[in-house]
Image (spheres, rainbow, N blue to C red):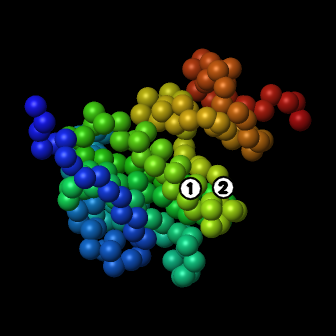
Amino acid sequence: MVTDSAHKKFSIRTVKVDSPEFKDTFDLEHELYRSYLTCVHNFKESECTQEQFKEFLCDNPYPDTDDIYGAYHQQYYLDDTLIAVGVVEILPTCLSSVYFFYSPSHMNLSLGTFGALLEIAYLRELNRSRPNIRYYYLGWYIHSCGKMRYKGSFSPSYLLCPELYTWHFLDDTIRAELSAKKYQRLNKSTE
């Protein structure tokens, strides 16, 4: 038996934070964000205000430029329903994945991983016209946090040594070290 849910249309709208399109969907995004935080992360309603949302995810690091650089919200729609938002920043050499939130009723779809794959596809598209934009930055990786651990499944992945600021390939050895002890100096040299 085929149900109506089998005929849903998926679409992504990428809107710059300062744009009229973003302002038109701000309330809708905030409601999704509030729902996500209260259901998935057990936040209190009072911690999910529009002001907090605006300060956390709606600032543009390049506010006075006509260039492509800046903060964008990639809005994921199923038919006309907003089901997820990926917040990204286009920077001179990378696409930075800032945050991702989704409808708790779609938790079973692994939208965070799906979003990361779509962001990688978006990076590849950007790279065709801007070859200098070639890296994908997944942001903070906290190995002991189960909700962030999916980031380590993308390969190649590199972690920055917190002491010497050198990049290190995330392999099974580093994973084991991080499992044994949360804080690790990844660069083992004595310099």
Residue at (21, 55) in percent of width and height: 79
**Image location of residue 136, percent across then percent down:** 59, 50
Any part of residue 136 in sight: yes
Q: In the structure shown, which secondary structural element does the residue marked by tag 1 occupy?
A: helix
**Which residue matches tag 2?**
134
Mark 2 residue element: loop
Residue at mark 1:
123
Q: Residue furthest right?
A: 191
50 w.r.t. 47: above or below: below
Where in the figure is residue 38, as x and y percent of width and height? 24, 44
Badge 1 amino acid: Leu
Instruction: Identify the residue shown where x is 35% and y is 41%.
Output: 111
Binning the other alpha carbons within 10 Å of mark 1 as few (below 14), some (14 to 19) or many (20 upward) gives: many
Residue at point 30%, 36% (across, down): 109
Query: Which residue is painted at 66% across and 26% down in the image?
Result: 171
Which residue occupies the foreground of this view, 85 or 190? 85
**Relative to 71, is 157 on the left or the right?**
right
- Of mark 1 and mark 2, the one earlier in the sequence is 1
Q: Quarter holding the N terminus?
A: top left
- Mark 2 Cα within 10 Å, few/some/many (few <14, many 20+)? some
Identify the disc placed on residue 98. none
User: 125 above or below 38?
Assistant: below
At label 2, the amino acid type is Arg
Q: Is residue 153 left or right of residue 86?
A: right
- Percent coordinates x, y for residue 145 in the rendering: 46, 31
> Percent position (x, y) of residue 55?
40, 64
CB under 8 Å between discs 1 and 2: yes
